[in-house]
Amino acid sequence: PILKASPNSRSRTAHSPGQAPVAVVMISLNEAHNMADVLDNVAGWAQEVFLVDSFSADNTVDIALSRGVHVVQRKFGGFGEQWNYALDELPITAPWTMKLDPDERITPALKTAIEAAVAQDKHDALYVQRRLWFLGEPLHVRQTLLRLWRTGSCRFSDVTVNEHPIVEGRELVLTGDLEHHDSPGLDHWSDKQDRYTTAEAAAQFRGDKLSGTPRLLGTALERRMWLKAIYSRLPFRHQLMFIYCLIGQGAWRAGRTGITWARMRAQLYRTIEDKTAEMKRLGHAVEAPPPRTGPPHPDAVQADVDAKGRK
């Protein structure tokens, strides 16, 4: 069973046989369609599981609570801020912390690799290979992402979108896949990306800081930030992005599904540019309509309420 930590506990606790000494942490908003599967995926493996929910209107919290997850509800103020709250305030007792999204699944091979790495105790930051799934089919597209670190050693870049964990120390890239089951259908994907592109365009309009320093010869994160900083000045950038997604990342191997993914992925960057241009013309940032939210759940910890019950 998934262990539930006491809200006031900060001490280290031993993990049970068959468990990894890992605290899985997720944030959510209306993720009921994913919650049962992701919790089944880590049940009996993770030492403890935490969820920071932004007042879901569906039964996300009910599903999590029914499986013994420690749930905190908190108003969403940006991905970086929400993750930093989670790392600062959750009563994590496991020696390792893992960031997991509700639409991700840890494969048995990756679980084995994580267990071996934390047992060796030679590294401070563990990277995983995330394999993308799109419309229910696996793509031959993988991303190397930092997802595990020694508890207390990580901070997230304080940005509205595209947050990145920042950890100093010895790094290791693990074998085995982390599956990313991105959106059950095109309508869901389009709605999610419409909100993302609006948030990204608003950040660019405001001139918000990037998640890292742009450097061509820097770290993987710094190289991504360098490309992001110069992308709008590249000729034929959207065509090149489509070719990169289709051929460079190998999406073509998934047939029509891969072609659709590459086309829509490239379109995201065009949409961000168009929305940014609209905001410049209007002279102000445009925010996406607020998402559907519900009332505080009576059985979840309320982060925005003090000891006397005041907002």
Image (cartoon, rainbow, N blue to C red):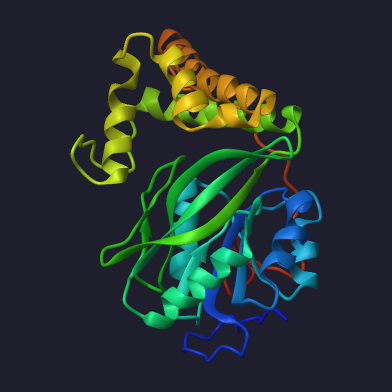
Q: Position of residue 263 (x, y in %)?
A: 58, 19
Residue at 27%, 67% (x, y): give it. 170
Residue at 66%, 81% (x, y): give it. 4
**Residue 303 visible in image:** no
Indicate left or right for 273 with 67 as reference: left
Q: Nearer the viewer, residue 32 or 134?
A: 134
Q: Position of residue 231 (x, y in %)?
A: 33, 21
Quick check: 285 above or below 196?
above
> In the picture, residue 196 is in which quadrant?
top right
Q: Position of residue 277 (x, y in %)?
A: 43, 11
Quick check: 208 above or below 119?
above
**Residue 306 visible in image:** yes
From this viewpoint, which residue is outermost toward the front? 253
| Quadrant including the C terminus | bottom right
Indicate left or right for 71 with 20 as reference: right
> In the picture, residue 51 is in which quadrant?
bottom right
| Quadrant including the N terminus | bottom right
Indicate left or right for 89 with 213 as reference: right
Q: Nearer the viewer, residue 189 or 203?
A: 189
